[in-house]
Image: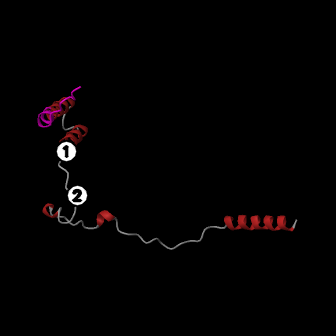
């Protein structure tokens, strides 16, 4: 019986502690945003020396898509330019079907 009484009083004490408001903290220290720091421009010629990944070539397809969604080109123009890109890609990288 004594153990049960101790457990009940312990649960009551925990409940009362949880009802108390959390302690107030002072104003949070804020760091400046990462974007606000000046970015060092790395010379493309030093990429291999500094073990940096190479810069990807500009993607013509994503540029066309951006222009389509911005409304600067029509759907027909987008499709025509994508078809021209497909023809150029086929000529540059021909795909032969596997021989059975």
Q: Which of marks 1 and 2 is in front?
A: 2
Where residue 16 sits, quadrant-wise, is bottom right
Location of the N terminus by quadrant is: bottom right
Q: Does 52 appear in magenta?
A: no
Q: Residue at x 20, y 28 (%)?
A: 97
Farthest top residue? 100
For disc 1, the marked residue is: 59
Measuring from the top left, give residue 41's x and y in whole percent: 19, 64
- Judged left or right of residue 61, residue 12 is right
Observer-nearest of 13 and 85? 85
Quarter assignment of residue 34? bottom left
Q: Name the residue under label 2.
A: 53
Q: How is the image coloured?
A: secondary structure
Total of numbered circles in the picture? 2
Q: How crowded is the residue under tag 1: few (<14 C-alpha within 10 Å), some, or many (20+)?
A: few
User: Height in image: 97 above or below 55?
Assistant: above
In the rendered image, residue 93, in percent from the top left (x then y), is placed at 15, 37
As drawn, is 50 to the left or to the right of 17?
A: left
Viewed as shown, does residue 64 lie left or right of 15? left
Residue 91 magenta-drawn? yes
Magenta segment boundaries in residue numbering: 87-100
Per the model, the C-alpha gap separating discs 1 and 2 is: 17 Å
């Amino acid at each position: 019986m004594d153990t049960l009484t101790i457990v009940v009083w312990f649960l009551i004490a925990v409940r009362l502690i949880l009802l108390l408001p959390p302690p107030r903290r002072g104003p949070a220290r804020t760091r400046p945003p990462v974007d606000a720091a000046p970015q060092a421009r790395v010379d493309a010629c030093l990429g291999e020396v500094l073990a940096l990944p190479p810069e990807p070539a500009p993607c013509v397809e994503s540029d066309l898509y951006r222009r389509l969604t911005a409304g600067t080109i029509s759907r027909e123009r987008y499709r025509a330019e994508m078809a021209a890109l497909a023809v150029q890609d086929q000529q540059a990288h021909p795909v032969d079907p596997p021989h059975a």
